[in-house]
Amino acid sequence: MKNLKSIIAIFAICFATISSNATEVNDPIKESRNLNSEITALLGSQAPFAIDETSKAEVLFTVNDKNEMIVISVSSTNREFKIFVKRKLQNKKIDSRKLKARTLYTLPVQLKNI
């Protein structure tokens, strides 16, 4: 009887350990697309300034505990574009839960003249 109880206890512990370590595998490409569409929606489709050619920027940001983007720096040769990107993204709540809080991320942003 003691052996049966011990075996049942061992199986219960093994089952609890295995089920607690099992995590859902998420597709990183899908997450990237979700974040990309969120950033595109936040930036909008029209810039409040005129551009002659394609403008590019590298945005260095982190995410706080409230899932808000904290823009640390925007590197671009176009000053208006830098200000525009920072104003549009600073402290905006994003839905992507896969970004770790207080981790630095780099985001390439490109603005094309259509």
Image (cartoon, rainbow, N blue to C red):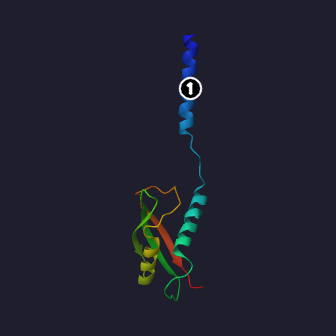
Determine which residue is flagged by label 1.
12
> Residue 74 in the image: x percent, y percent?
41, 73
Quarter of the rendering containing residue 87: bottom left
Give the secondary structure at mark 1: helix
- In the displayed structure, 105 sits above or below 112; it is above
> Residue 107 in the image: x percent, y percent?
48, 68
- Residue at 61% x, 59% y is 30
- Residue at 56% x, 43% y is 23
> Residue 110 in the image: x percent, y percent?
52, 76
Q: For the C terminus, which image quadrant? A: bottom right
- Residue at 49% x, 87% y is 49
Relative depth, front residue between 31 and 53: 31
Number of other residues with Cα within 10 Å of mark 1, as a class: few under 14, some 14 to 19, many 20 or more = few
- In the displayed structure, 107 sits above or below 51; it is above
Q: For the N terminus, which image quadrant? A: top right
Quarter of the rendering containing residue 68: bottom left
Relative depth, front residue between 99 and 67: 67
The number of discs equals 1
Under mark 1, the amino acid is Ala
